[in-house]
Image (tube, helix red, strand yellow):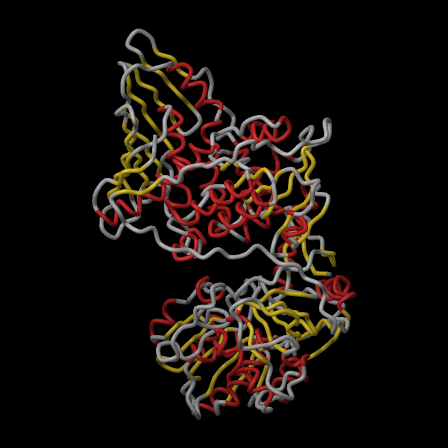
Amino acid sequence: MKQVVQNYKSGELALLDVPVPGCKPGGVLVRTAYSLISTGTELMKVSEAGMSMVGKARSRPDQVAKVVQSVAVNGVPATYRKVMGKLDSYTPLGYSLCGVVERVGAGIDDVKVGDLVACAGNEHALHAELNWVPKNLYTPVPDGLAPRDAAFGTVGSIALQGLRQGEPRLGEVALVIGLGLIGQLLAQLLAAAGVRVVGVDPDPERCALAERLGAAACGDPDSAAVAHAVAELTAGHGVDQVYLAAGGSSNQPVELAARLSRDRGRVVDIGKCRLDLPWNAYYEKELDVRFSRSYGPGRYDPEYELEGRDYPIGHVRWTERRNLACFLDLVARGRVAVEPLVSHVADFDDAVETYGRLRDGALKAVAVLFRYPDGTAAEAVDGAPAVTAVTAVTAAPSVAVPSVARPAGTAPPARVAGRPVRLAFVGAGNYASSMLLPHLAGREGVELSAVVTTTALSAANAQRKFGFARATTDLDAVLGDPAVDAVFVVTRHSSHAGLTRRALLAGKAVFVEKPLALTPDELAGVLAAVEESGNDRLQVGFNRRFAPLLREAQERFGARTGPASLRYLVNAGRLDHGSWYLRAGSEGSRFTGEGGHFVDTASRLLGADPVSVYAVAPPGDDDLQVVLGYPDGSTATLSYVTSGAPGFPKETLDLFADGRVLRFDDFVRASVYDGRRRWVSSRLPKARDKGQSAELAAFVKAVRTGGPMPVPLESLVATTAATLAVPASLAAGVPVTLAGAR
């Protein structure tokens, strides 16, 4: 299928061939009939992409701050790879469309194949022939409403949410500053609500259009006509509400709002405009400044948008989806007219040319629609990776470590001598693209055979940047391909165990990023797949044990004779609001997701697997103290904290045994003290090498030669069981014995 994309680094626009997105549970696959260009938001993004790197940095200071923090934690090279990987990637455009349901995912019962729906979202309602849309971001189109009119649904919802934030009342007067697409729709909505509207825009054609569609008066912001109209309509008191629907760097809209508002009026910001509030003017009138966040309540809430959890109508009357349905109803009943706003309808094949004409000013438009080729026959869309059900770890004083059963005669699949090791990736997100694939692309003896994702563009980006032979959403075809030797599972945590099971049962060697499982049942399911298939070719992405500096320090420390005490501090830091790591209900706790890294590192240094786990945490805090017990009496104390300073090193550890101390500082410096001499790493490494390259080399070698996996399966299982025992210990308030651990 085709999709409009832009390279943020170069500014290039393209109509790209990408795989059809998978139809995941909780949503529908929609074939687009019409999609709407937001001539404000999208053209701002297109223009920003054409800036120099300095210009981009100036326009997004929030992202610059994240880069600085990443350098402090991960070092310059890793941060550079991550940033350039994001910049030099195709990004999607579009967020408002209407189309026909082509496939219905599991759990959806409110629409059926063939239904017409309006869709929203800058990750789901894209300028593409097919889109997967979750439940709360689509709504059925009312009978009789044309698809091209229904394509306005998302933008109309933005205008409607702005109106709700202004709380207009019958008979009031409102000022709408900016008569672009949002402003035009907002003016009509206000008029339909019994509010008299004065519009402001420097474009006389837009002013005339707004007046034809119901505004009482419109004019240029610099003319006296607007002030006269406001004075006449309000008896000199000023308008009740001002809606800022303009963009740009001028502070004129904010100043005009203060001048024309009544005492204690309301000012609602909808567009992205400069907001240097003149203090005296806003203070003296005690103006109420409000913001309108996109389509309505639910926006940016992953549980609402992605997991389909609606808000009770008694608590939240107007959500994203209800706003979308309400706007379509108003259009269907003739209370809002969208057809007069359409300046141009372009065939989808002409999308790049259309954007170019808009950007260069050759096409002046309020609203532009893309018209898609007729396509009533559904394309064959193969299944996407299943979403694995997640349950909580049950608290108990003893947690069983599943035993590893290997049928007699187990042997790795035969490979053709001299043929490259052929790898397939399931998932191609930030970590895979910045920390794994750069070490595999171009490696001698390795062939990147296929990349599988449930979204079209991520697969296309990975194929372009790393040279995969094919990009697809068809996981079954890849697992059934005898030429694929190994599968990398680099997806969200909740899918790891299920995808690992499927790949093992298909006879593939598997590299799965941590965690291997989120629950004991998932872990048992993975081991059942090993027993059923006789395939134990599994590696979990515990890369720290492969870090060159850590291995050198351990060699310098030497063998020990008595028990050891290890202290490991992880300054994990706070996560950004909205991070999927915070979705504990579906993706497990944060420690469950990444704690295996630190358990595995401790076990590597102590030369054994843990036999007990005791965890404590302050009430209402994410900080954890975890004490691991080992067979020889050694202990490891993991302090996993989120409340520390971001500038402090992320990982530091000290190992004490036999009168010696090993000190390890965040993968940049290591020391060993033994009373007679002191060893210090000879130089600071240029980058924090956390072992990914060495780990991947060891895995590829094992697949190529048929030799043992880099880490014994028993150790991977023990580390995972110990990580899962942490919430059990927290709940029970006592140490947990890992039954069956050696």
Residue 638: % across, % down? 31, 35
Q: Quadrant of residue 147?
A: bottom right
The structure residue drawn at horizontal position 65% and vertical position 81%, both measured from the top left corner, is 149
Q: Quadrant of the N terminus?
A: bottom right
Position of residue 319 measured from the top left corner of the image (x, y, whole percent) = 45, 75
| Viewer-closest of 32 and 688 | 32
Q: Nearer the viewer, residue 198 or 101?
A: 101
Left or right position of 116 against 641: right
| Above or below, comparing residue 632 to residue 598 in the picture | above
Quarter containing the C terminus: top left
Q: Vertical placement of 592 versus 188: above or below?
A: above
Q: Position of residue 490 (x, y in %)?
A: 54, 45
Q: Position of residue 35 (x, y in %)?
A: 67, 71
Q: Residue furthest top?
A: 676
* Horizontal arrangement in the rendering, residue 491 relative to residue 597 (left or right): right
Front residue of 59 and 3: 3
**Residue 451 relative to residue 347: left or right:** left
Q: Residue at x 43, y 51 (%)?
A: 581
Q: Residue furthest front?
A: 408
> Can I make out residue 292 in this image?
yes
Residue depicted at 61% across the width and 67% down the height = 125
Check the image and report above or below for 275 versus 16.
below
Return the residue nearer the eye: 649 or 500: 500
Residue 51 in sight: no
